[in-house]
Amino acid sequence: MRSEQEVNKAMEQYSDTIRRLCMIHLKSYHDTEDIFQTVFLKYVLSSVVFENAEHEKAWFIRVTINACKDLLKSFFRNHTVPLEELLHEPAELTSDNQEVLEAVLSLPNKYKDVIHLYYYEGYSAAEISNILHKNVNTIYTLLTRAKKLLKEKLGGDFYE
């Protein structure tokens, strides 16, 4: 079990990354908070010795993505409707940033992961390859396909 100091340091370093990844996958504040707690509980109980800070960050990213996938596959999740869907109409997009975010969120998970890690976290394709345990050429292919989908969704105005 990890010390309180280790946990507090990890929370300071990785809480934003974990929350962003969760929101990309789950699109729900409450589910994000649940997964956030789950990830840090796994960290507290884990006996993994990290080689360096990058190894530790990659562990957090991998555990977060897996926890999100597990939640999305759960029986409860697949057989219920969020209360928000029943109470609210979808909000209108008011800015370009929201439109880009909506387009990224509408991508399949395999594309969301690489887009988030590449553009938001600043990882190279080789680093993403190590984090996601996929071939580096697969990462390049996923990035290319994701960019093409975003270009189709957003038009030429937003694309490089």
Image (cartoon, rainbow, N blue to C red):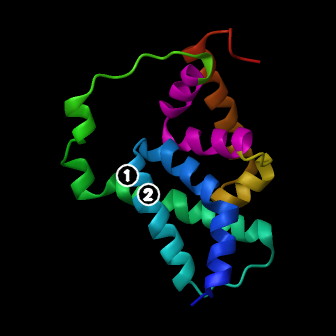
Label disc, if present, on residue 33 of the rendered structure? 2
Q: Residue at x 55, y 81 (%)?
A: 44
Residue 37 in the image, given as x and y percentages of width and height: 46, 67
Q: What's under tag 1, amino acid-wise?
A: His
Q: Is residue 149 visible?
A: no
Q: Secondary structure at mark 2?
A: helix
Asked whether 135 or 102 is in front, the reply is 102
Q: Residue at x 33, y 55 (%)?
A: 73
Q: Residue at x 53, y 57 (%)?
A: 65
Residue 36 in the image, given as x and y percentages of width and height: 49, 62
In the image, residue 29 above or below residue 33: above
In the image, residue 127 above or below residue 8: above
| Magenta span includes 104 | yes
Q: Viewed as shown, does residue 20 lie left or right of 80?
A: right
Residue 16 in the image, given as x and y percentages of width and height: 62, 53
Q: Viewed as shown, does residue 13 lie left or right of 26?
A: right
Asked whether 142 or 155 is in front, the reply is 155
- Whether tag 1 and tag 2 are in contact, CB under 8 A, the answer is yes
The stretch of residues the image draws in magenta is: 98-120
Q: Quadrant of the C terminus?
A: top right
Mark 1, residue position? 30
Q: Residue at x 56, y 83 (%)?
A: 46
Magenta-drawn stretch, dominant element (helix, strand or loop) = helix
